[in-house]
Image: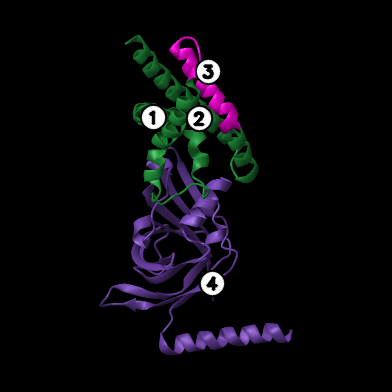
Amino acid sequence: MQEIFKNTLFAGIAIFIFSYGGLLLAISLFPSFFVDYISPVFNSDGSRDVFFYLHPFILSLALAVFWNRFQSMFRGHFVLRGFEFGFIYAAIALIPVMWITYSAVDVSLSMVFTWLLYGIFQSCVAGIIFAWRSHLKLSH
Amino acid sequence: MGFITKYYILTFLLSMSRYTSTTKVNEVWIIKSSSSLEVDGSTNINNFSCKIHSYNQTDTLYFSPKDKTLNHIKVNGKLKINVADFDCKHKIMTKDLQKTLQAQKHPYMIVKFLNFSNMPSSPISNSLTTGDVEIELAGVKRTFQVQYAIHKTNHQNIELIGTRGVNFSDFNLKPPSKLGGTIKVKNELQVEFKLQLKKNI
């Protein structure tokens, strides 16, 4: 249990930094792409901002539980294990969720596609952190 | 002439006589349906311009003689603008503006003209003038001083261009902020209305 919480914390911090850093960078590099986000579909009044910024930790907790149960199935260099973990998560969770989102919510295909890439990036970051921590533990 | 036409003419004449019996009217100008309104704003990622291309109805402005003590001309008349007619040239942004302006709850933006510093027919062609307007938006009324540029197209027709900076917060509205505040609409807006006026003889 302690290991799950430690993994959650480490991966949560890493995802927070990389995701929001990446988001701010993308907004400054491709501002026109983000115009579609000025839409009534997205919360406007800031009342849910705290949930938005807690997302990396919620995601990390879910992924840490998944990692704890199935880590023995991932083999090889810790970076490769991290990527494999990230892509498996994308295949079993992200693709179906994005599929249903596109089918039910008035958002563009390009927007949903970037969410898929963003999700794969986040799960790969978490996977690499988990695999790196596991690698460190084994080498000690 | 049909009954309905006669009824409307009679109603108009009665309302005119009621207004003129209490307030002396110096000039009457018709706001033409071709009048337009533009709201310009910006976000941290783009600029936007939302426009009512055409007022699509006519209204009347009644100008009283100049009040020497207050040094202005009292005006009676207003624009009743349907918020749903705003077009931001971007379907999603248009929807978002209408949501921000609470178009469902308060479908109309009302611009009530209170006074002008000069008569529109003042001899100075292409002159500048000022006046107070009361803007009602999202159920909140605020009074602003507006600067107007008067362009005379001919003796009977003028274009009155009024500009004024306003804030979302003036009307207790919160500018939209998306994705945890990473995309923000700025509080300041520039409102420009172009009134096409025709003198009523």
Q: CA distance from mark 3 to mark 2?
A: 21 Å
Foreground label between 2 and 4: 2
Is any atom of residue B183 visible in this view? no
Q: Position of residue B50 (x, y in %)?
A: 50, 51
Mark number displayed over residue A75? none
Mark number displayed over residue B59? 4
Q: Chain of mark 1?
A: A
Image quarter where the N terminus of chain A lies is top left
Q: CA distance from mark 1 to mark 3?
A: 17 Å
Q: Chain of mark 3?
A: A
Q: CA distance from mark 2 to mark 1?
A: 20 Å
Q: CA distance from mark 1 to mark 4?
A: 69 Å
Q: Position of residue B59 (x, y in %)?
A: 54, 72
Q: Nearer the viewer, residue A137 or B48?
A: A137
Which residue occupies 57% across, 70% down? B58
Q: Give the residue type at disc 1.
A: Ile
Q: Chain of mark 2?
A: A
Q: Position of residue B49 (x, y in %)?
A: 48, 47
Foreground label between 1 and 4: 1
Vertical comparison of A66 with B56: above or below: above
Instruction: Report the residue marked by disc 2.
Output: A119
Q: Work out whether disc 1 and disc 3 sit on a shared chain.
A: yes
Which residue occupies 38% across, 56% down? B168
Sequence-first disc among 1 and 3: 1
Q: Give the residue type at disc 3.
A: Met
Instruction: Report the residue marked by disc 1.
Output: A4
Which residue occupies 59% across, 68% down? B57
Instruction: Examine the residues drawn in magenta and state their main secondary structure.
Output: helix
Which residue range is magenta in the image? A72-95
Q: Nearer the viewer, residue A114 or A33?
A: A114
Q: Work out whether disc 2 and disc 1 sit on a shared chain.
A: yes
Whether the magenta-drawn stretch holds residue A73 is answered as yes
